[in-house]
Image (cartoon, helix red, strand yellow):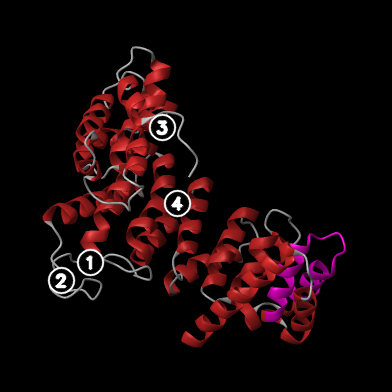
């Protein structure tokens, strides 16, 4: 973790400085400085209670919520979210409901949404006690659920905080301000996992703003994996000849994660773009035999390109092992014999990825 530009003690001192620049720097880094001294713990409620200066930090951030400088107010809110302080919610509610299109209101809305997500994540570990492969929150917090250990009863605070954060992010999908809808799309996936799918699909159906549509499609693509309802929407976008390039590509990545071949054409086009090539190869590798046969020649060209960086050649060969093993395996084995450390590292990563994809294939 990079070192912070200010110590905890200095941030506490400057949080009430008459100089706006000093206050801004202090408030921006106050929560991070405290968390660093706590050893950067996992998200949880009331993290500040574990440090002798925690109470003073929370008080300074709470006071900064009324600062005349907009960025200071916004950073104070996200800092309290980082520390898992639910009392910040009443302060940010007016920001969430402010439809003013100006940049100051937009910045406050964005930070309010981020704060809600941070609080939800802080409450979720106790509320759900979910492992890494959990599918999201339960619909009824009072119902028994296999993600909780036998006899575990979440605290009222974690349940209430999680539900408050989730409700605000869900409502933000229908907010008048597009910047808030944009922020809510990814935030809902973070809080709800696959349980976010129906709300995201419904939001996409009625969304016309191009940036928000991209955020919703990207959020659906992040589901692990997208379900049938999400894939129906993603396929409609991927096969729409009028869809923007980045929108179709985002939809194709989500379809590939679901092993749905309908996203093949945008992935082939992405092989021609240097910035998207690596992700397109990964997506085609995920599709494996379901990838379009037309993908083999361009992938082979990348794998054999003399001017192509060696790591990218390994990535292409790895994709070919999945898409056309009879072509890809000899090429992969040839690259695996290289003595260059960077190539050896790329080959090791590719082998691990091939093993992971094989396990996923077996589970279907």
Query: Is 285 in the magenta?
Result: no
Q: Are marks 3 and 2 in contact (CB under 8 Å)?
A: no
Name the residue nearer the viewer: 166 or 266.
Answer: 166
Mark 4, Cα crowd under 10 Å, few <14 / some 14-19 / many 20+, is some
Q: Residue at label 4?
A: 207
User: Which label is found at residue 139?
Assistant: 1
Of the two numbered discs 3 and 2 on the same chain, state the one appearing first in sequence: 3
Of the two numbered discs 4 and 1 on the same chain, state the one appearing first in sequence: 1
User: Which label is found at residue 143?
Assistant: 2
Q: Is residue 301 left or right of residue 68?
A: right
Residue 156 point in image, percent of width and height: 12, 55
Give the quarter of the image for residue 286. bottom right
Q: Secondary structure at mark 2?
A: loop
Q: Are marks 2 and 1 in contact (CB under 8 Å)?
A: yes
Residue 292 point in image, percent of width and height: 69, 77
Q: Is residue 268 left or right of residue 240?
A: right
Residue 316 point in image, percent of width and height: 73, 70
Q: Give the extent of the magenta segment.
A: 295-321
> What type of secondary structure mainly makes up the magenta span?
helix
The extreme top residue here reads 18
Q: Secondary structure at mark 1?
A: loop
Of the two numbered discs 3 and 1 on the same chain, state the one appearing first in sequence: 3
Of the two numbered discs 4 and 2 on the same chain, state the one appearing first in sequence: 2
Structural distance between the alpha carbons of marks 2 and 1: 8 Å
User: Which label is found at residue 107?
Assistant: 3
Q: Secondary structure at mark 3?
A: helix
């Amino acid at each position: 973790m990079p070192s912070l530009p200010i110590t905890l003690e200095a941030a506490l001192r400057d949080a009430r400085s008459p100089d706006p620049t000093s206050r801004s720097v202090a408030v921006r880094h106050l929560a991070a400085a405290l968390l660093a001294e706590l050893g950067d713990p996992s998200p949880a409620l009331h993290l500040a209670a574990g440090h002798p200066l925690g109470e003073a930090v929370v008080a300074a951030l709470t006071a900064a919520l009324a600062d005349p400088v907009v960025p200071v107010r916004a950073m104070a809110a996200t800092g309290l979210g980082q520390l898992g302080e639910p009392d910040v919610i009443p302060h940010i509610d007016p920001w969430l409901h402010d439809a003013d299109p100006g940049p100051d209101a937009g910045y406050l809305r964005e930070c309010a949404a981020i704060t809600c997500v941070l609080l939800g994540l802080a409450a979720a570990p106790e509320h759900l006690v979910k492992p890494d492969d959990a599918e999201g929150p339960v619909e009824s917090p009072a119902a028994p659920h296999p993600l909780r250990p036998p006899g575990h009863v979440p605290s009222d605070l974690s349940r209430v905080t999680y539900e408050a954060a989730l409700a605000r992010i869900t409502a933000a999908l229908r907010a008048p301000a597009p910047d808030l809808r944009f922020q809510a799309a990814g935030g809902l996936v973070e809080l709800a996992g696959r349980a976010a799918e129906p709300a995201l699909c419904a939001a996409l159906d009625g969304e016309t703003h191009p940036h928000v549509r991209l955020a919703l499609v990207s959020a659906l693509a992040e589901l692990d994996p997208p379900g049938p309802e999400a894939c129906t929407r993603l396929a409609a976008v991927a096969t729409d000849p009028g869809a923007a390039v980045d929108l179709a590509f985002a939809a194709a990545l989500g379809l590939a994660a679901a092993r749905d071949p309908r996203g093949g054409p945008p992935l082939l086009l992405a092989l021609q773009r240097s910035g998207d090539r690596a992700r397109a190869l990964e997506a085609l590798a995920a599709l494996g035999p379901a990838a379009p046969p037309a993908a083999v020649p361009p992938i082979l060209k990348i794998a054999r390109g003399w001017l192509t960086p060696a790591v990218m050649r390994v990535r292409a060969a790895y994709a070919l092992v999945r898409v056309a093993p009879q072509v890809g395996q000899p090429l992969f084995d040839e690259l695996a014999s290289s003595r260059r450390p960077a190539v050896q590292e790329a080959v090791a990563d590719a082998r691990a990825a091939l093993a992971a994809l094989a396990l996923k294939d077996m589970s279907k």
